[in-house]
Image (spheres, rainbow, N blue to C red):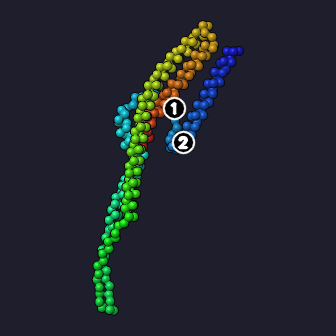
Amino acid sequence: MLDVNVARGDLLEVQRQVSAATSAEAKAKAKLSVRFPAAAYDAKPMAEPGELDLPLPQWRERILAESDAIRIAEGLLKKAELTAARMRADRVADPTVGVYTASEAMRSERIIGLSLSIPLGGGYRNARMQQALQEVEAARARVEHQRREEEAEIVEAYLEATGGLERWRLASQGLAASRDTARLTQRAYTLGEADLQTLLLARRQALEVSTAAEQARLEALRWQHRLLIDAHFIWGLADE
């Protein structure tokens, strides 16, 4: 009865994990369909992580060049610079030259005149120019801040991708060893050299190691795909 209860407990735990994984898959599928309606969902086995094709400097150069956030910040900086240039030009008001005609004495006399207007700039124009210059500096600071933030994120993603690949390889080696242990324990149980609880323990450990290995594979692939997406190497983002 004790062996049966232990085996039933292991079975219920595995069923709980399967239910949790099914729910997580359904939520991920729903989120994917909402954010990317045109994306086709294909439930196929995960690929194995591989070595990154580019070194860190090339990833940094590519991602920074393709960054939409940096492009937006640079566009706002250019707009602020153009506004400041216009404010600087407005400090010297544009003179206005005019020609006018008139008639007098029952239109028997015609008058032709020339007018010249030179507005004088004041404190208001200077204040607007100073404000525009401050906005330029703020926009330039935002560009630099965005660039530094993205550089830090690129380094983090690269290190996580490379480290994740190594962790997955180590987890795979541990998985092979645990499966071999479970196989040998099963043989020992068949021959009467091990009890059921020992067999269940070996299988439980193999299952835990298998779950850890799959999680390590998922993390490695997630960081690698983050680099690919940010660099616009996939999903055709480079053409949009």
Give the residue at the far front of this rendering. 123
For badge 2, the amino acid type reads Ser
Give the residue at the far right of this rendering. 1
User: Which residue is the site of mark 1?
Assistant: 44
Q: Tell whether 10 sits left or right of 93.
A: right
Q: Tell whether 18 sits left or right of 61.
A: right
* Element on which disc 1 rests: loop
Where on the picture, by quarter, is residue 206?
top right
Which residue corresponds to the image point at 57% horizontal and 16% vertical from the top-left?
202
Residue sitting nearer the eye, 155 or 183 = 155
Q: Is residue 103 above or below residue 193?
A: below
- Rendering coords of residue 200 (x, y %): 61, 16
Q: Is residue 216 above or below residue 144?
A: above
Q: Quadrant of the N terminus?
A: top right
Task: Give the mark toward the camera: 2 or 1.
Answer: 2
- The reply to whether discs 2 and 1 touch (Cβ–Cβ < 8 Å) is no
Q: Earlier in the sequence, mark 2 or mark 1?
A: 2
Q: Tell whether 198 sits left or right of 236.
A: right
Q: Tell whether 6 sits left or right of 63.
A: right
* Element on which disc 2 rests: helix
Which residue corresponds to the image point at 66% horizontal and 21% vertical from the top-left?
9
Which residue corresponds to the image point at 65% horizontal and 18% vertical from the top-left?
7
- Rendering coords of residue 64 (x, y %): 38, 41
Q: Is residue 210 above or below residue 161?
A: above
Give the CA separation, mark 2 to mark 1: 17 Å
For badge 1, the amino acid type reads Lys
Which residue corresponds to the image point at 41% horizontal and 47% vertical from the top-left?
142
Residue sitting nearer the eye, 110 or 128 = 128
Q: Is residue 66 visible?
A: no
- Rendering coords of residue 47 (x, y %): 47, 29
Q: Which mark is residue 33?
A: 2
Q: Is residue 111 visible?
A: yes
